[in-house]
Image (cartoon, rainbow, N blue to C red):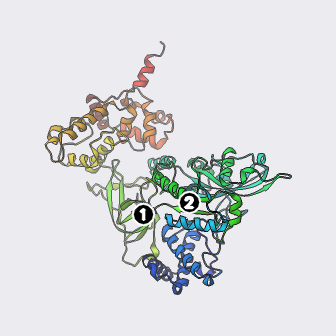
Amino acid sequence: MGLAIIFIAQFLFMYSNTQTSQLQKQTTNFLQHPETITETALEALRQCLRFHEHRYYILNDPLISDFEYDQLFKALEKIEASNPAIITADSPTQRVAKSLTKEFPAAQHLVPMLSLDNSYNADDLLNFDRKARELTGLDTIEYCVEPKFDGGSISVIFENDLLVRGATRGDGESGDEITTNIKQIKTIPLSAKFSDYGLQQVEVRGEVLISKNNFARYNQQLTEQGQTPLANPRNSAAGTLRVKDPVEVQKRHLEAFVYHVSYYTLAAGKTTPKELTTHADALEMLWQLGFRSPQKEKTVVQGIAAVIDYCNAFEIKRDDLPYEIDGMVIKVNNLALQEKMGMTSHHPRWAIAYKFKARQGTSKLLNVEFQVGRTGAVTPVAKLEPVPIGGVTVSSISIHNEEYIKEKDLQIGDTVLIERAGDVIPQIVKSMPDLRTGKEKPIVFPTHCPVCNSQLFKEAEEAVWRCINIECPAQVVERIIHFVSKDAMDIRGFGDANVRKFYELNLLHDIPGIYTLDLDAIGKMEGFGKKSIDNLKVAIENSKQQPLNRLIYALGIRFVGETTAKTLANAVTHLADFKNFTLEQLQALEDIGPKVAGSIQHFFSNPANIEMLYALEQLGLPLQNQKKQLVTAHLPN
């Protein structure tokens, strides 16, 4: 949220359920009926903001989305701006927070890490520019525009060219000292030649991220290990900064953009370098020193019209970026002008954040359905009141497993916070038990398969309940769907709906049946014209040319992802050779541990699976590793 938390008297730290409910109702009223926010309601509005700041900053347990909080904060600002005489010293608009939950040693920032004022439309930016021109006396201002990275904010201090301390933002004045974890981030150098610019001590600010690819890769590893995947890149990056095991921090492949020189001292006899005359030059200096600054992403433009154009263009390509951003930051480029414009107790007057469309929202959990996957895993799926988030209406979300439900304390009827980040699947961030009315119902996990009624089992080290009946119709269908999917055999024209339809009509019973499908009969069905049948026939034939690793992945062996499938493909000359591999031989392969090896051996020791492989080979799918055969053929006798 990036907004200041004011001093909160001790009695405010413990809100009763009654107080919480009352404050949340007041919040809802303000959000739904902004006309009620008048001077007479001012103290109630301040109290609501204090309450939500406490939930966010101290408890790390918000009840409203960032966008909703910003709406309340800007309403308070508007009222106070219309009558400055009513501004109080303890208003949320007036002071940087002082409170901090301490799990790491506290680290005082050399200068406060103020928040940025937020804007959501062009009118807000025009108003910002008007004020900037009034403060500077200029007709046109040069701005630097860069992405607003969506991760965890950090402050890093260098002394005599060496990294000496890293800290989280915390409450703005002090944060958690996390130097060891900062050193795991390879985009932050352990030393930087600030002395080349005459600088002795330097504090730089930045944002720690997990790229979309690294996030997806790490979540795939968690899934293959039977663990609950992380919710989103932003929370994962911020949370990783506070992980106490640096080895685990390193595994998550954090990255950092450093975007600001917040403080510096000069070495004896040195003067301020020319690189610190504009913000853009400072970014270039950081880039040259080995930091990952937004040097390539930023632009420098004249006037606010060009700023608005750049922001609009960047929002369109937002989802194409390798990392998450939630807006743009606009800064007066000239550092002397920044100094002249100054700052409030909450934010600098020379910068503003332009926020993209909100990707959080609250909804009601209406029901939970239980679905059976291709490996027999039973997954609960939350059915929600439809809520628009980031341009998509969300009404259904996976809630993973029984332990996840307990961890999030989910009940049917709960108000829940939903988040969607980029192309990441929407997640329930949290439930809001403070808003319960007593009508909520616990989520009861089934003891038997909801499809075939077989008893469910759960291994001791796993969180997932499974149906172990491999003939379970749900598993059969899901295995076929996975086999024809884009990342597997890529048989376009099938899709989930067609697989289910063909199975229900007894036209398709198993994976080999894909290649003996009665296309003539399907062509006579409603919705299937000659062109679609011809395309499906071509796609089926083309799938026979897929490389062996794609076939291995398509088989849906538990714990075997795309990377492991490539390792397996390169280990044999014929896929069926794996039926003779021992656990030790499998574990000798790259990145294959005991759990994955056991799953592979279990698959290839099943006679029905071997029979299926030979059936596919007879139907024209190559089970041989052509590359390995070619190499073997050229080995000297």
Q: Position of residue 528 (x, y in %)?
A: 18, 44
Q: SS class of the residue under badge 2?
A: helix
Mark 2 → mark 1, Cα distance in angstroms: 47 Å
Q: Residues within 10 Å of mark 1 (few under 14, many from 20)?
A: some
Residue 80 seen by the camera: yes
Instruction: Name the outermost residue toward the right.
Output: 269
Q: Residues within 10 Å of mark 2 (few under 14, many from 20)?
A: many
Q: SS class of the residue under badge 1?
A: helix
At 48% from the left edge and 56% from the top edge, which residue is drawn? 312
The picture quadrant where one finds residue 485 is: top left
- The quadrant in which the N terminus is found is bottom right
Of the two numbered discs 2 and 1 in the rendering, the one whose residue sits closer to the viewer = 2
**What's under tag 2, amino acid-wise?**
Ile
Q: Which residue is mark 1?
A: 405
Q: Earlier in the sequence, mark 2 or mark 1?
A: 2
**What's under tag 1, amino acid-wise?**
Ile
Q: Position of residue 523 (x, y in %)?
A: 16, 41
Q: Position of residue 185 (x, y in %)?
A: 62, 49
The mark tally for this picture is: 2
Q: Which residue is mark 2?
A: 304
Residue closer to the observer: 191 or 459: 191
Q: Is residue 159 left or right of residue 458?
A: right
453 to 538, vertically: above or below = below
Residue closer to the observer: 161 or 381: 161
